Amino acid sequence: MASQKQVKIAQNQYAKILAELGAHTLAIDYLNENSKKNFALIAITDGDVSAIPKTLEIMDNGTKAHVPVIAESSEKFKPQ
């Protein structure tokens, strides 16, 4: 699992790549698993959610970490 800091690193490093894969919105969310504070990157796309990777690899203070990604499908907001 990943800390909030690690998810922010992944968001900054992979935002352009995820946008190219169809993600129009990125968010950080808290996961309540095993009573530990874990976070994930939420990628919202109006395309194919299977195009979004399930994890992103980052380096955090010289240590490799894997950040979970949750892909969700939703249309991009359009002002009326």
Image (cartoon, helix red, strand yellow):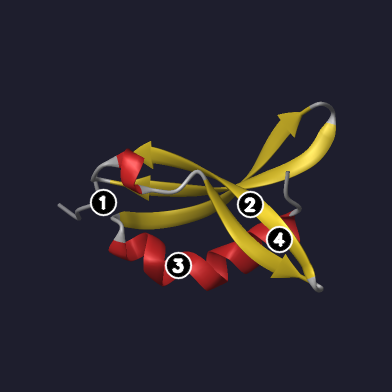
Q: CA distance from mark 3 to mark 2?
A: 13 Å
Which is more N-terminal, label 1 or label 4? 4
- Residue beneath label 2, please? 67
* Residue occupying image coordinates x 75% and y 42%: 38
Circle 3 or circle 1, nearest the eye? 3
37 shown above or below 6:
above
> How many numbered marks appear?
4
- Residue beneath label 1, please? 77
Q: Residue furthest top?
A: 34
Q: CA distance from mark 2 to mark 4?
A: 7 Å
In the structure shown, which secondary structural element does the residue marked by tag 3 occupy?
helix
Q: Is there a contact, CB below 8 Å, between mark 3 and mark 2? A: no
Q: Is residue 57 left or right of residue 53?
A: right
Circle 2 or circle 1, nearest the eye? 2
Amino acid carrying label 4: it is: Gln
In the image, 36 versus 66, the foreground residue is 66
Amino acid carrying label 2: it is: Val
72 shown above or below 35:
below
Q: Using the rendered image of the protein, determine whether residue 5 is visible from the camera's viewpoint.
A: yes
- Residue beneath label 3, please? 15
Which is more N-terminal, label 4 or label 2? 4
- Residue beneath label 4, please? 6
* Residue occupying image coordinates x 61% and y 59%: 57
Residue 64, image x, y percentages: 73, 62
Q: Residues within 10 Å of mark 3 (few under 14, many from 20)?
A: some
The N terminus lies in which quarter of the figure?
top right
Q: Is there a contact, CB below 8 Å, between mark 3 and mark 1? A: no
Amino acid carrying label 1: it is: Phe
Amino acid carrying label 3: it is: Ala
29 shown above or below 13:
above
Q: Is there a contact, CB below 8 Å, between mark 2 and mark 4? A: yes
Residue 11, image x, y percentages: 55, 64
